[in-house]
Image (cartoon, helix red, strand yellow):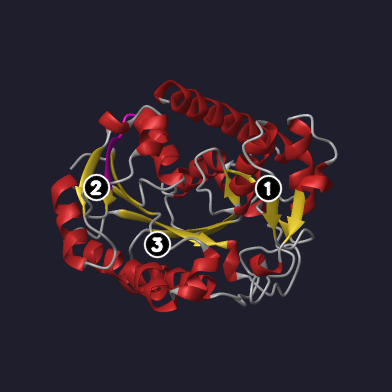
Amino acid sequence: MSRNTALITGITGQDGPYLARLLLDKGYEVSGLVRRSSTPNLERLERLGIRDRVRLIEGDLGDGGSIINAIDLCEPSEFYNLAGQSFVPESWKTPVQTGDFTALGITRCLEAIRLIDPEIRFYQASSSEMFGKAQETPQSETTPFWPRSPYGVAKVYGYWITINYRESYGLHTSNGILFNHESPLRGLEFLPRKVSNAVARISLDLQKDLQIGNLEARRDWGYANDYVEAMWLMLQQDEPGDYVVASGETHTVRELIEIAFGRVGLDDYEKYVVVNPDFYRPAEVDLLIGDASKARAKLGWKPKVGFRELVEMMVDADVELEKTKLAVKQNIL
């Protein structure tokens, strides 16, 4: 079995394509688990120019047999679990499904590894949402969890079952407790991308306003492409472990919006922003800001892209995307 073979679940999401590109650049053979569908969404892989360089295997975290099949087919030395229901507001609407995929799905992955090849190194995408009603600031690997959404609760289960398989069976399993990380590949349902896309459309007279929830909510935002490097570094360590991955800075939604509108020359952003109570969470998390000291010390990892650069990058990408879509539409008409 090659020591440079990886299996990624959630390869068509935001983080999966960035991680796949990183691994390909390092000489890995990369396979990805994709849900059975007549038209799988491969747009993000195509945008990074790697669609034809990865092997796609049908399956999902709800089906343990498909996970076993994927491992048999690609014989990975590293298994990165990035899949699951990842949109926090949706988890209140589908709490049972969220628990099945985001919690129990991890157990299916770990059990498959235990039965087929215990030498496979496993990465679990944990989340700062596990801290929820944060008991201390900033949050580190020793901060108690108090999740405030079905998604956060499911992630806590995934975190502890990952550690349980490490301690019970000696597997090389690691948790990356990633704080919010964004990019131009982020889905439109996520707030930073919702903002960057709305700003682009408003600047092109394609949209009138931006409907938003709590302007004073604060998050620790970073760049997804930086964060996948931390994932890889965790599985290169002799000993498995759990690491907070964060920028160590906190910013409000208002700051994000101000920078985004400023990027397109609309400094009077207030006239375009409509606060809509429908977008408030049933239970808002408190101040989330990560202490990534352990990742810096043991992995040698630190973020390269700052908050302003990230927001401006996303706005620029959405302006180009909307211009392209507009040009295509005009040519068709």
**Magenta range:** 27-32
The secondary structure type at the circle numbered 1 is loop
**Position of 264 relative to 141 (above/below):** above
Closer to the observer: label 2 or label 3?
3
- For marks 2 and 1 on the same chain, the one whose residue lies earlier in the sequence: 2
- Identify which residue is drawn at 75% across, 38% down: 261
Say whether marks 2 and 1 touch (CB < 8 Å): no
Closer to the observer: label 3 or label 1?
3
Q: Quadrant of the C terminus?
A: top left
The disc at residue 76 is 2
Which residue was labeled with disc 3?
84
- Identify which residue is drawn at 37% across, 73% down: 97
The disc at residue 157 is none
In three-dimensional space, the C-alpha distance between marks 3 and 1, rounded to whole angstroms, equals: 24 Å
Q: Quadrant of the N terminus?
A: top left
**Number of residues whose C-alpha sits closer than 10 Å to that of mark 3, classed few (under 14), some (14–19) or many (20 or more):** many
